Amino acid sequence: MVTQHFSIAAETDASGNQAVMVPLNRRALVPMQRDRIWRLRKHLVQSLRAMRTMRRPVESASPLRPEPEGFIGTLARAACTLCKGWCCKGGGEHGYMDERVMARVRQARPHLDARAVIRLYTERVPTSSYADSCIFHAKTGCTLDRSLRSDVCNSYFCTGLGNLVKTAEAPPAAIIIANHDGETRMSPVITP
Ligand code: SF4
Ligand code: SF4
């Protein structure tokens, strides 16, 4: 059995094991307010209207990037779960959606009209979400699947996670440390 050592200060120890440092969402869950859903609907209507005037809707559609694969993907999911979505705080009632995202969603679902696309989103609004965060930010994480999310959401990594995802080789083992304002949570040692 190999004993795993982690140096939090150095973030990567001599064996290549990593401590991945991420923030921690400490917001409270609050019941969904109707006016938030109204603002989401308004934003989607505006985005769908803007989509209709796009010059090259196929070429300009927002890309659908895949998740990181393999062990790095496992670590990325573990980090976001432990952190509970700190980076979703700017999502408001727009979730970073725009006409390019609407173009991608409509092209992937040609049988749906604009009203049905709006319903796709409003049906995913949770009954409670984190205060001062994105309308889709529920206790279980984002209620949208990747195909409905913006490219901003699908491609963003905070600094600690971004450094891990950029590395060419996955570490042999890692722990995730989520911290904010004096509260720290740590994962068990994660191995492939
Ligand atoms: S990308 Fe970083 S800040 Fe965002 S949920 Fe994942 S660990 Fe948290
Ligand atoms: S749409 Fe999902 S991933 Fe994007 S900010 Fe909102 S909760 Fe976070």
Image (spheres, rainbow, N blue to C red):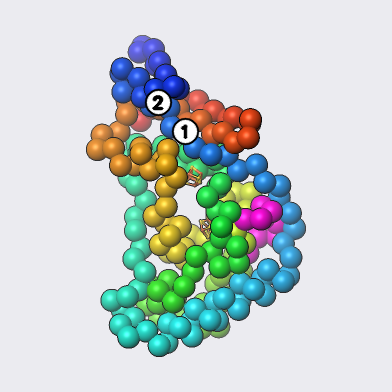
Of the pair 56 and 10, the residue shown nearer to us: 10
Q: Is residue 3 above or below residue 114?
A: above
Task: Please tell me in which quadrant of the rendered image residue 74 appears.
Answer: top left
Identify the residue at image location x=39%, y=12%: 3
Q: Quadrant of the C terminus?
A: top left
Left or right of 180: which side holds 166?
A: left
Q: Is residue 157 above or below residue 72?
A: below
Please state the horizontal and vertical placement of residue 47, each as a whole percent of the image: 49, 78
Left or right of 146: which side holds 66?
A: left
Which badge, 1 or 2, is on the more N-terminal residue? Answer: 2
Identify the residue at image location x=68%, y=68%: 36
Whether residues under marks 1 and 2 lie with C-beta atoms below 8 angstroms apart, the answer is: yes
Left or right of 91: which side holds 18?
A: left
Q: Is residue 39 above or below residue 55?
A: above
Left or right of 56: which side holds 47?
A: right
Q: Quick check: is 129 in the magenta stretch?
A: yes
Identify residue type, mark 1.
Met
Disc 1 residue crowd, few under 14, some 14–19, many 20+, Cα 10 Å = many
Q: Quadrant of the N terminus?
A: top left
Q: Quick check: is 60 in the magenta stretch?
A: no
Of the pair 7 and 57, the residue shown nearer to us: 7
- Residue 123 visible: yes
Identify the residue at image location x=48%, y=81%: 48
- Residue 190 visible: no
Task: Please tell me in which quadrant of the rendered image residue 24 appears.
Answer: top right
The magenta stretch is 125-133
Q: What residue does disc 1 label?
A: 21
Q: Is residue 180 above or below residue 11?
A: below
Q: Secondary structure at mark 1?
A: strand
Q: What residue does disc 2 label?
A: 11
